[in-house]
Image (spheres, grey):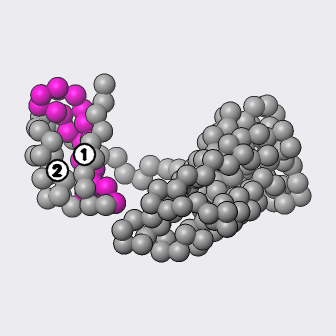
Amino acid sequence: MLNFNIRGENIEVTPAIREYVETKIEKIDRYFNEELNSNANVNLKVYNDKQTKVEVTIPMKNLTLRAEERHADMYAAVDLIVDKLERQIRKHKTKVNRKFREREGVGTYFAVTEASLEPETTEEEYSIVRTKTFDLKPMDQEEAILQMDMLGHNFFIFTDSESNGTNIVYKRRDGKYGLIETN
């Protein structure tokens, strides 16, 4: 059973919105055993341009399901979120069935049904198709952002000239920049 924690930013979570979100997300409950007792954290956000963003996080013992979707229509975003969560579950179930069939633990969350035994047709294999090696040049954050923009990339890895640590600058969806610092 899923317990819902629904939060709204710049939007009031009305009973109609709450009911729609709970009804749609509860559909993924069919993929799990009855023992599943988890919280579904749902964050609804409305931006100034009337664009909505829906985030769903369902933490469990050995697996965390998370999906995020932006759309002009919040109800459509919720539908797309459910599709993403179902794809994640099917993908994980396929992996569990293939690699950990005889083990307990990760696979005990999933209910075994006729539908779940069908092979996943769009299984995605993770393979590295290209490897790059380069020296990290010491620079400040502004220079790293300039380098990233000049190269046309979404992120840039550099050595911070002050801390001598490896850092990453990246371009956010809102057009601003973010910084990841390593220890």
Give x and y (percent) for residue 135: 18, 37
- The answer to which of 33 and 104 lies nearer the viewer is 33
152 horizontally vs 57: left or right: left
Q: Secondary structure at mark 1?
A: strand
Using the image, tell me which numbered label, if any, was put on residue 145. 2
Quarter holding residue 18:
bottom right
The verdict on residue 164 being magenta is: yes
* Amino acid on which the number 1 mark rests in the picture: Val
Identify residue for label 1: 169
Mark 2 or mark 1, earlier in chain: 2
Image quarter in which the C terminus is found = top left
| Alpha-carbon span between mark 2 and mark 1 | 7 Å
Quarter holding residue 140:
top left
Q: Residues within 10 Å of mark 2 (few under 14, many from 20)?
A: many
Q: Are marks 2 and 1 in contact (CB under 8 Å)?
A: yes
Magenta residues, as a range? 153-173
> Which residue is rendered at x = 72% and y = 36% of the image?
106
- Reply above or below: 51 against 148: below
* Amino acid on which the number 2 mark rests in the picture: Ile
Q: Secondary structure at mark 2?
A: helix
